[in-house]
Amino acid sequence: MASPFTLYPSTPSSSMLKTPRTKTHFSFSNTKPSFHHTRKKPYISNSILTTEKTDPNIPQTVHRFWQWLKDEGVVSAKTPVKPGVVPEGLGLVATRGIGKNEVVLEVPKKFWINPDAVASSEIGNICSGLKPWIAVALFLLKERFKGEGSKWKYYFDVLPEGTNSTIYWSEEELLEIQGTQLLSTTLSVKEYVQTEFLKVEEEIILPNKPLFPFPITLDDFFWAFGILRSRAFSRLRKQNLVIIPFADLINHSAKVTSEDHAHEIRGPAGLFSWDELFQLRSPLSLKAGDQVYIQYDLKKSNADMALDYGFIESNSDRDSFTLTLEISESDEFFADKLDIAEENGFGETAYFDIKYGQSLPTGMLLYLRLVALGGSDAFLLESIFRNKIWGFLELPVSRSNEELICRVVRNACKSALSGYHTTIEEDEKLKQEGNISPRVEIAIEIRTGEKRVLQQIDDIFKDRETELDFLEYYQERRLKDLGLVGEQGDIIFWEPK
């Protein structure tokens, strides 16, 4: 029988950079700001920008950016945070004690970079039909190339040239994540961005040379994409994609366990005006000199964070692997199985994110049992059982069905594990030896995490195989319901009176 589901990537690719088979569902939802473009050794203390004298640890571009914020009225002497040199590179550092949930900054809407800013700009008309992120990307590039003529000039001066996101890795660096799902996702995203660039270049950039009198390369477009992916806020009430200068200097910490820190409010935006404001609150109590942190996203895996921000957490709770289950079109019961899946919130293909140390996702075993149904169990697919079958699938159907599930899942795990060029033990040794670059460190953690999860999945179904002779299956449960089998499994014979 053909495999009831597909697991990507299952085997190492003969050509590492060929187009991956995974589908990319691209979205800017749940993005957070970041400034993790370099990894520096921790400083003894955070160095913060001061007004009395120029701090040699703070780049001049940051001093000029701060002065611009002051001149524009975004910050004042009462603002409790300032840019500072921190272990991550740049961040926001408290200038005084800050209480939990206290407001640390507010930025008026006129400084936000979002689709509204694009619409009111000189490229607004030609960008009106574009995907929002592409429109904002073109806006970022145009303003960046304007230099002194841009309202956001001093903001662009402090933006990084790139991050450690895997979209910026060389082919040699990508070899370090060979066999991982992160590699497949990275290549899919790179292909997607390149396709969108070629399209917007042909339809928008080249036909409008007066508006884009400067060359825009694919590398430029990737820069804008990376800036949006790593720095945009997306959980505001009315904003799905917005960059907030100054606020986006804030870094992530695993110590922060809530995401309720960013708010959109109305308030004073000058001496005599009111406007919408982006408001950021500190999720932690801080003392002067502490760095202000937020939680970027509690749900993202380490692979997601490596792709979006270019850093990961050492916390194994973020290690994840996605199983892709699929109802084969060649299955003789394809139509029936698809109907049942759709009636219960699934489809022809289902994705299950499995996290290290956690149980299997809800619905995964049910979907597996449905896809594996066949032979003597196929009667359950008949219309008479249509309203009850999903309930039946919550428990083992038959020994053959459960055995097939275990065998296929374990074979898929073994196949996926064979795609990595190192073992968990070899990765652990590399980490102990030290002296590795930030990107190689990310690669080691990602592939180690994926392998741990795959081993965990294999162990779950290995244990399941040992229980097959002791499980209660559908037919036995049915006979018990009819009173034809005793509690000990013995058949009850009824003698006529």
Image (tube, rainbow, N blue to C red):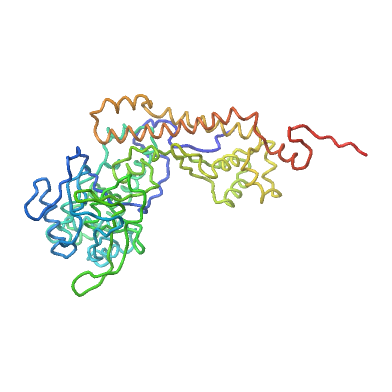
In the picture, residue 82 is in which quadrant?
bottom left
Q: Is residue 198 visible?
A: no
In the figure, 470 relative to 215: above or below?
Answer: above
As drawn, the residue found furthest toward the bottom would be: 272
Residue at (70%, 42%) from the top-left corner?
379
In this orientation, which residue lies closer to the viewer: 31 or 21?
31
As drawn, the residue found furthest toward the right would be: 497
- Position of the C terminus, as image quadrant, is top right
Residue at (59%, 27%) from the top-left corner?
466
Residue 459 at x, y percent in the picture: 50, 30
Residue 327 at x, y percent in the picture: 56, 42
In the picture, residue 176 is in which quadrant?
top left
In the figure, 294 relative to 326: above or below?
Answer: below
- Position of the N terminus, as image quadrant, is top right
Residue 127 at x, y percent in the picture: 29, 62
In this orientation, which residue lies closer to the viewer: 173 or 101?
101
Residue at (54%, 48%) from the top-left corner?
347
In this orientation, which residue lies closer to the viewer: 490 or 465?
490
Residue 496 at x, y percent in the picture: 91, 38
In the figure, 287 relative to 267: above or below?
Answer: above
In the picture, residue 100 is in which quadrant?
bottom left
Q: How many numbered circles does the render carry?
A: 0
As drawn, the residue found furthest toward the left would be: 53
Q: Is residue 424 visible?
A: yes
